[in-house]
Structure formats: structure tokens, C-alpha cells
Image: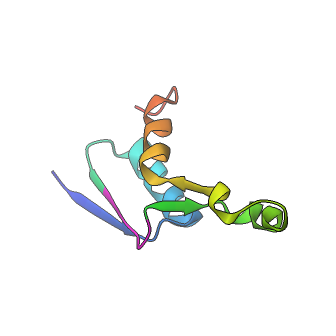
Amino acid sequence: MAKVVVIGGGYAGLACLIDLAKKAPQLELHLLDGRAEHCKVPSLHKTFTKPVAEFLVPYAELTQLMLEKPGNG
């Protein structure tokens, strides 16, 4: 089985993983990022009223959401 490593868990890295998972489900996909959470950057302007921690989403949670979403294999 071919392995693919995506470096960086920002929006582009996540989009790449999602697209690869849909188009080539036979691939073994891995994400390499320095953090355990994805930061929802478009929401950062709201950090004036809420802590930044409220905008962090664990990659494990994102993975689970993608696995549960209909049409994602």
C-alpha cells in the first residue's frame, strides 16, 4: 500500500487529505503537524471575546467527523 504524508495541518493540508481520501481510498494517509489541534483561523478575530483555546479542534476529532460524514468512504 502506498503511503502519503501531508506536512502541515492548516486548511490546505486538511483539504489535501480529504481530497486524497475521497479519490484514492487505497492510500495510507498521514498528517504531520507540530500541534495536536487545528486552529480555525477565520474565527481568530473572535478571540477578543473568547479564549483562543475555544477555536482549537483536535485532529482526532476532525478525523472522526470525516469518517462519519456520508459519502466519505
Q: Observer-nearest residue: 31 or 40?
A: 40
Residue at x 44%, y 38% (from the top left corner): 64
- Residue closer to the observer: 36 or 71: 36
In the image: residue 36, left or right of residue 46: left
In the picture, measured across the screen, residue 24 lies left or right of residue 9, that is left
**Whether residue 57 is situated above or below residue 44 in the rendered picture:** above
Between 18 and 24, the one lying in front of the other is: 18
Where, by quadrant of the figure, is residue 25 drawn?
top left
Observer-nearest of 8 and 45: 45
Left or right: 11 with respect to 4? right
Task: Residue at 34% x, 46% y: name it.
Answer: 24
Instruction: Quarter of the image for the C terminus: give it.
Output: top left
- State the image coordinates of residue 20 (x, y, percent, origin top left): 41, 51
Magenta stretch encompasses residue 33: yes
> Percent position (x, y) of residue 71?
50, 28
- Whether residue 32 is in magenta: the answer is yes
Picture quadrant where residue 31 is located? bottom left
Please report the residue visible at 76 percent of the width from the left and 60 percent of the height from the top. 43
Q: What percent of the width, then of the height, locates residue 56? A: 59, 58
Q: Farthest left residue? A: 1
On screen, residue 13 versus residue 4, left or right, reads right
Bounds of the magenta segment: 30-35
Q: How many marks?
A: 0
Q: Quadrant of residue 47?
A: bottom right
Tell me which residue sits at (51%, 26%) in the image: 70
How far from the left and from the top, in percent, is residue 30?
Answer: 31, 58
Q: Residue furthest top?
A: 70
